Image (cartoon, helix red, strand yellow):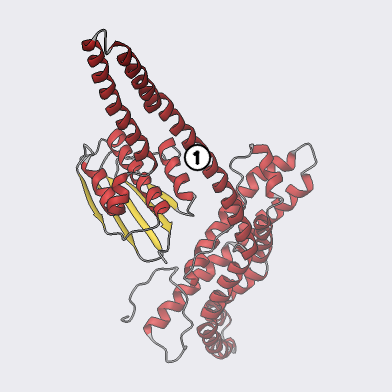
Amino acid sequence: MTDFEPMPLLAPVHLDHPLPVSGDKLLDRWRLTLVAAGYALSGVPSLVLAILTVLCLCLGPALGVGVLLALLVFPAVAGLTHLHRTASGRLLGREISAGYVETAHLPTLVRPIRWLRDPARWRNVGFLWFSATGGFAMSLLPVALLTMPVTWFIIAVAGGGWTWLLFLVLSGPALAAWWFVTPPLVRARALTERAMLGSSRVADLEQRVEHVEESRAETLDHSAAEVRRIERDLHDGAQARIASVGMSVGLAEKLVRTDPEAAAALLREARETTVSALDDLRSVVRGIHPPVLADRGLSGAVEALALALPVPVSVAVDIPRLPEPVESAAYFAVAECLANVAKHAHAARAWVTGSYDGDRLRLTVGDDGHGGADPRGSGLVGVARRLDAFDGNLRVHSPAGGPTVCEMEVPCRTT
């Protein structure tokens, strides 16, 4: 990096050797001093929110005043700590997750009660007091050391005489201390925030177990619904046609001697009905595990899907054979996304890309339509539920005006 090359304000902190002095190092310390100033300034809202949090706890039983105050204070605390997680995470070069307990599904007035039982919210409260006290002092020190020579210079100009000597004596050590301690102090502040605001391993595991339990329940419900659908398709389709064939053959057997022409007509009708019953059975089988998927794998099956779509679809999928359950889930997920393109996107073109790195299967379905796809719609919820059964996930990017991009990722190993 050349001298004085600009860098992002929240670029990661590197504890390089302070000597020799260079333009890059000077610029980096100026940057970190600005970051420290921001940390110090955040101590003011932290103190205010910390006091308000205590008021929430004290006023909780008083006719619900504390509950109403908590509905304002806790989201504000979450917003402030989110900014700190983001800033400290970027300074450390890694994401800091909050690990909050999900409360969006609860009634509004019940949420504060659940927040009080959330360890992550209590970590937020502890952080507020740290930010307003020790964290404030830690972050103010680089700013104070850098501005100390200016302060003493003003005093020297105003006082004259021996104060000039004081300015000369104190300015050098202050700047030297600023040079040496600024990067370690900013990094120490970021590490402290990660320790206080980051979710613990136990909390992560508990959240993961809860997610797996929900995913398993949804998968079982989905499987039961699929079984009912197959039973209904067989009952209303193939089974009814096969029963009709049996009746036609029985009538033909009775008429074969007295009215051969009527018997022949009944047999022709039975043959046609048999063909229709076979088509129904093939349709049911395709809904369970498409033959093209078994024959050509996921790459070939996606290409076949694209050919049948009325919208031009470019396919760039290079994926080896994977376990059948994963292939089936990915195939139906892509099929649902492409069906949404055909029905709702009003797109001129679409695309499907896919890759496999030996550990994760990644698929992307996109279109140049008008956008606005709702991830909570029944179709995309079904896709997410299907992938959830394999610990996969679905991300939907669909701003108004488009384009829409659905990114799917499923952990999968072939060995």
Q: Residue at x 39, y 53 (%)?
A: 324
Query: Can residue 415 be seen here?
Result: yes
Q: The C terminus is located in which quarter?
A: bottom left
Q: Residue 199: percent from the left, percent from the top?
A: 60, 62
Question: Is any atom of residue 372 visible in this view?
Answer: no
Say if 42 sits above or below 237 in the image: below
- Image vertical order of residue 246 relative to residue 199, above or below: above
In the image, 358 versus 81, the foreground residue is 358
The one nearer the camera, 241 or 193, is 241
Residue 278 point in image, percent of width and height: 31, 32
Expressed as whole percent of the image width and height from the top left, the position of residue 297 reads 30, 53
Kind of residue sitting beneath label 1? His
Q: Residue at x 40, y 61 (%)?
A: 360
Q: In the figure, residue 19 lies in which quadrant?
A: bottom left
Q: Which residue is mark 1?
A: 222
Percent x, y of residue 73:
65, 48
Residue at horizontal 45 percent and vertical 68 percent from the top: 10
Q: Which residue is at a point 56% across and 66% down the rendered structure image?
A: 39
